[in-house]
Amino acid sequence: MTRTLHRGLATAVAALAAAGTALAGAVPAQATASPAQITTSVTNGVAYLRSLQGADGGYAGSGLSNEWAFSALAAAGTAAADVTPGGDATKNARLVYRNQLAAPTWPNASPVVTDYERGILNSYAAGIDPARVGPGRNLIADAVAYWQTAEPGYFGPSANFNGTVFALLALGGARTQAGAQRVPRPLLDASTAVVRANQHTDGGWNYSKAAGNPTALGQPSDVDMTGAAMASLCVGGVPNTDSAVLAAKGFLKAKMGSTGAFNAMYGVNTDSNGWAVSGLTACGFDPQGADFTSPAPFRKTPVDFLIAQQFNPGGGFRYQPTDTSPSAYASVDGLRAVAGGGFTATPPTPVTAGEPQFVATSGFTPGTAARLALIVDDGTGNPRPCAVTITPSGTTATLGDVLDAAATASPAGCVTAVTPASGVAGPITSLNGVANAGGSSWLLSIDGGASITADRTATVNLGDTVSLRYGS
């Protein structure tokens, strides 16, 4: 079971399972967290995350590192480009992270889809276009390469269901620099259908596949994964009035205790509360609303619980109520949730002079291999995404170059036949055996832009998400 996306709860299962599930000490009766309390919490939380920056300016490292700090900082309104060690702008956190992601050795020798999904969510929050990290690094294409052709909608092995949840969060949440949804709706719809199929009878989810297995569907759900999965549905375009989303909300409501803490699989803790609050927020539910305020005399919310776990003025969050020191992972999850963030956030514009909201590589490097995400939709409801590797001779390429290279794409089969064939210019008249007919034809959209006639000579740039759709 892959849990490398976040806190790595499995590494502390024994200790967590033995931990108590109630807050130590008496809980005073008071109203929900005030705006002033939230502001103070966010300010101090940002200060703590700044203190986690390495001397080299970095946050990411081997294993479960602190790179999730970027999503929390962005939610709190702090740009990664403004986070520097000792004021040294040449080591700002965004620059260092971008260089790490662009390195050929990242993430490791045996990557999994969640590595790339984590990279998408955090690079976007850091103000790095995830499709244009560097000449040879397109995180969107890297994730798309893990599409499961035999089980459409899943990303990565279906047994590790969390890979699909975070694919939705990443591909749906990391928009273009202009704010457009870069992947087509049919692709997101296929994965939202998978998330629905894996929802347990209690309204929640856990990290492993349950679809088609009544026994698994009847097992207790996990608070953490329920927060992430419900967020993935909403980020994927499902309204918060949908029955699946409402069932997830009901599951979380039933798990909340008088202190505002959720009774999670491993006991009461900041990370689980953070994931649940981020899920509610992503779906437009108020984590301090009536549904998530405990009865009198407590009157506590999940945000109250999170703020109570924070050390002040240090700003770090403890993992469990009985802990005497802060945890980096808990501090990230706690700050992101208190600041009102989901699992990524639109990056704020840096205050540092000369630093733009986004950084990106603007063109192909001639002779350097680059990946592009290609999605083919023949209108039957079965999109075929793949990652295509091309080696352009110039700073731009053509749709024909992409289609020709798709013969060796990953996964295979997104393009099986195309007319006109390689070397012949002109509009696409047939693709994968589906020919233009009547009022329908093959259309091209780049990065979620307007659809135009698909022509082999159409210009394709570095990092473009290339979508071909059969329709009118």
Image: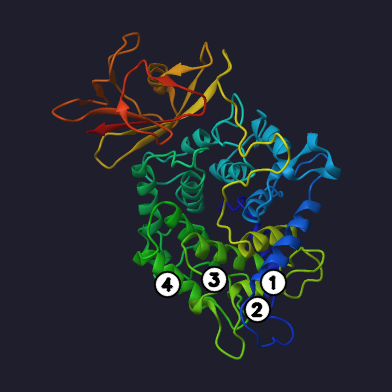
| Residue sticking out furthest to the top | 423
- Label 4 to label 3, Cα distance in Å? 20 Å
Give the mark nearer the N terminus: 4 vs 3: 4
SS assignment at label 1: helix
Name the side, left or right, on which 198 lies relative to 274: left
Q: Tell me if residue 267 can be seen.
A: no
Q: Amino acid at mark 3?
A: Pro
Residue 423 lies, in percent from the top left, at: 35, 8
Residue 103 location, quadrant: top right
Which of pointers 1 and 3 indicates the residue nearer the eye? 1
Residue 77 lies, in percent from the top left, at: 65, 53
Name the side, left or right, on which 465 lies relative to 150: right
Disc 1 crowd, CA 10 A, few/some/many (<14, 14-19, 20+):
some
Give the mark nearer the N terminus: 1 vs 3: 1
Q: Tell me if residue 164 can be seen.
A: yes
In the rendered structure, are the residues bearing label 3 and label 2 in contact, judged by CB atoms less than 8 Å apart?
no
Residue 358 lies, in percent from the top left, at: 61, 37
Q: Which mark is residue 202?
A: 4
Q: Residue under label 3, please give it.
A: 287
Give the mark nearer the N terminus: 4 vs 2: 2
Q: Residue under label 2, please give it.
A: 21
Which of pointers 2 and 1 indicates the residue nearer the eye? 1
SS assignment at label 2: loop
Q: Residue under label 1, please give it.
A: 37
